[in-house]
Structure formats: C-alpha cells, structure tokens
Amino acid sequence: MRNPLQNAAAGNTLKSPGATPGSAGYTPGSAGETPGSAGRAAASLAELVTYRTVSSRAVAGVETDQFEAFIAALPRLYPAVHAALELERVNGHALLYRWPGSALAEDPAAAQRASVLMAHYDVVPAGDPGQWTQAPFSGHNDGTFLWGRGTLDDKGQLVAILEAAESLLRAGHAPAHDLYFSFGNNEETAGNSAAAAADLLAGRGVLPWLVLDEGGAVAGGAFPGVSRPAAVVGVAEKGILDVELLTRDQGGHASTPPRMGATARLARAITRIERSPFPQSLPEVTAEMLRRFCPHTPPPLRTVFANVALLRAPITWLFGRLGNETNAMTRTTVAITTLEGSSGANVLAATAKANANIRVAVGETVEGTVARLRKIIRDPKVELRVVEGNGPSPVSPNSAQWELLADCIGQVFPEAIITPYIMMGGTDSRRFTGICGTVYRFAPFFMDVRARGSIHAVDEKISLETLDRGVRFYETLMREL
Ligand SMILES: [Zn+2]
C-alpha cells in the first residue's frame, strides 16, 4: 500500500452509498468492544511485527526463515481459526484460508457468493533503525500505540481479519457462504503470489462475489477544507508501467564529441516528456468524491464542488496546478527514475538509458500510452522498450457489494464521509480483477496525515484504538456477509 490519500483520485459512477455519514462525532473506542479481544489483537500484532518479513526483489535479500516463523506463529495465536478453516500455502509463502460456508451443501450456486478478504504480511525495509523512536521490529506497545514496520501496512489488517474470525468462531458464528482470506508475501515488490492465488481460485471455479484488499483508509485531513474524516474506498487503481528509453552512438573519446550523441539525444527526449504532460481529464469517480465532500467543505469550495458537472473543465485545470497529488488524479504521469550513460568520465556513451516509470490513468491502455510517449519524443532514434507493467484496473461499480461495505463502514465509523476514489499506487487486488468485477480497496483504520506519512517511512505505528476498530469492522463485515 502507499499513502492512501496521496493515492486519492478518480473513474466511474458510484452514487449514494448505503450509509449516509452519521452525525456522531469521532468517538474512539465507544461501540461495545470487548477489551479482551482488543488486548489480544495488540499482543498478536506486537509479536508478528517482530518477524522481519522484508520483501526484496533479490532472492538472497529475503530472510526466508522470518517468513516461516511468521507463518508458524499463526496457529498458536489463532487456534480457533486454524481448527475451523482450511489453510494452504500458495507460491511458497502466501497463505490462502477457506472458511467453509454453511449454505454450500444445499446450494451449489453459493460458490459464487464466496468473498475474499486480502492483506499482505511482507513489509518494506525499515531504513536506518536509528531514526526510529522505537526499534522498527520491536512491536513496542506504549499503552497508546503499537510501534513498528508493518503495523499499518499491512500486518495490522491481517491481524484485524484473523482476530475478527477468531472471536466470531468462539461465539459460534459460521458464515453462510465461503469466506477466503488471501495473505500475500510479496506485495511490496509487485510479486506474483496474489496472481497465483487468483489462478488457484479460478481453477476451482470460484468467482468471488466480493474482494476486499488494502488501499483506502479512514483518512483525517484528507482533502483541503474537508472537516470530517473520509473513508476512501479504492474502486480502481492506475496502471504501473516501466519503459526503457535507449539511445545509441559510436562512443569513443570525449575530446572529440559528436553533435547529438547518445546522452544529448536522451536528454532531449526527457525534456520533451517533461514539457508535454499527458492530457488531463477528471474521472467520474473523482467528480463523485468531490460531490460527497461538498456538504463538509467551507462555502467557496462547497459552491465549486456542488457544481462539478458544470465546472468540470476549470476544476480539472485547477487540479493540474494545485499540487502533485491532485495533478496525478487527472492524468497519466511519467517520472524518469533511473539514468545511465558512459561508465568513464572521459568516455563517450555508446548507449544511454533512462527508465520512465509511468502511472497509467484509468481508461487508458499500455499500448496507447507507449504510442503517445513515442509521439511526444518524436525521435525514431530513441528506442522504447516496455520493461514490465500493466494497465489500469477496471473500475468496480456501484453494487450490492459497495452498499454492504458502505453500510459496515458506516456502522463502525459513523463520523466518516464514505467515498470511492482511484488509487495512484498498486495493490495485490489488481490480480483478482480477472475473476471478480467487484474489487474494493480499503483498510478499516483511521489514519491522520502523520500516520499516512509514516507508511514506508520511519515511526510507523498504529493506535490500539484504531486496531480495535479495525477488528470490529471485520466482525461486522463477516456477520453481514
Ligand atoms: Zn501494503
């Protein structure tokens, strides 16, 4: 996951969700939680944070024993879950649980009412441990916060799911339909475990009714001027595409350089990309988000948001200039991330290379994006090669599933404005869009600006109250499913 509201953005029509935001204030820890389960969730998360399940693209960089230790701890922490659910390992270290539904025996069609709750337990590196207030893999509990890498992204979500299932099982609850938990081990490196899990389900004829993964959150200070927290639920994510730009020349001694050598040609191409941003548009999902923020914004903004249909063109223009986040909501973006030229200070480059990391706007394609890039560069001597990537996800529609989610969010976070949005970053759930048309991205955790800033940074931590509400959200959802 990335910072959920840096991710906020845009693409289709999601009208009035089931739950209208209630008028209650933000009341931490009110709605009837059991302190026992809250304490258990915190203790489990504290332990699970201590396993250094750091993702790395270099196989040698992965501490496999830490992933094994994490997996080995789960049956001890969640005995009821491990007694009642089937568990299989996918692609090595990913986990797929199946909680058999009670309705299945009588109704074979019920297989199509299965739901998948997702999370991942790999984490990004902690950086310099000296910069952290509490050691990044300590799981230190100071009575208010639980500290450490992965508490928000995304071990906290995994714990909230398992904790909810554990308490429901102890209370004798059984789901009517199959419920799957799919826990990834390589989300942070865009690995293939989630795809393997989706393939496995597809091979068994399971086409989930609902898929819920990380992505959005209950965000405080989500949008300038919006007074309430916003429960932003990702209904789509932009595509991620790496394109290599390559130029060639004779090379040779730097004392007699040619005109427009490999590096100069590459630089010209990069400058052209910088000067010609992709075209803008305001996706319908973003317009819908503004409409939902409208009643909670101060008058000048309120008037603008209320008339988003009329003011679409100027709002889109404004978004392009307000800041990097709002700009990214309205277009495909290109960042030149790596550069490579000659290896010697006095040697002309025989080849020069750059990597363009491209975030493809919803509604566009990889092919169309590469074609436009070619047009912008307008130099046949610059070779383009797609290194890897995928187009944007489809947009999950307004649906019974959306209504259900909104209803559960409303029950646990009555103060929040519930809105769809388009994520800038990627999640494992994009691998499930081939087998499910209703994929949503939301972690049931309140995150203020600071909490969102700590994801992938130093001092990541989750408040105990936030974790507890997350457990309650999943209990609510599992009952409603
Ligand atoms: Zn994540």
Image (cartoon, rainbow, N blue to C red):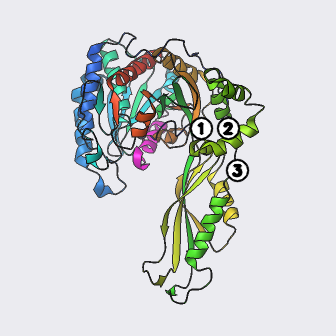
* Residue 95 at x, y percent in the picture: 34, 37
Q: Could you tell which of marks 2 and 1 lies nearer the N-terminus?
A: 1
Q: Would residue 362 be seen by someone viewing this image from the given angle?
A: no
Query: How many marks can you see?
Result: 3
State which region is magenta.
187-205
Near-viewer residue (352 or 82)? 352
Q: Residue at x 32, y 43 (%)?
A: 93
Q: Could you tell which of marks 1 and 3 lies nearer the N-terminus?
A: 1
Q: Is disc 2 in contact with disc 1, using a CB cutoff of under 8 Å?
A: yes
The kind of residue tagged 3 is Pro
The disc label shown at residue 283, or none = 2
* Residue 349 at x, y percent in the picture: 50, 79
- Residue 48: image quadrant is top left
- In the image, residue 397 above or below residue 366: above
- In the image, residue 83 above or below residue 198: above
Tell me the quarter of the image containing the N terminus. top left
The kind of residue tagged 2 is Pro
Q: Would residue 431 be seen by someone viewing this image from the given angle?
A: yes
Q: Is residue 398 left or right of residue 153?
A: right
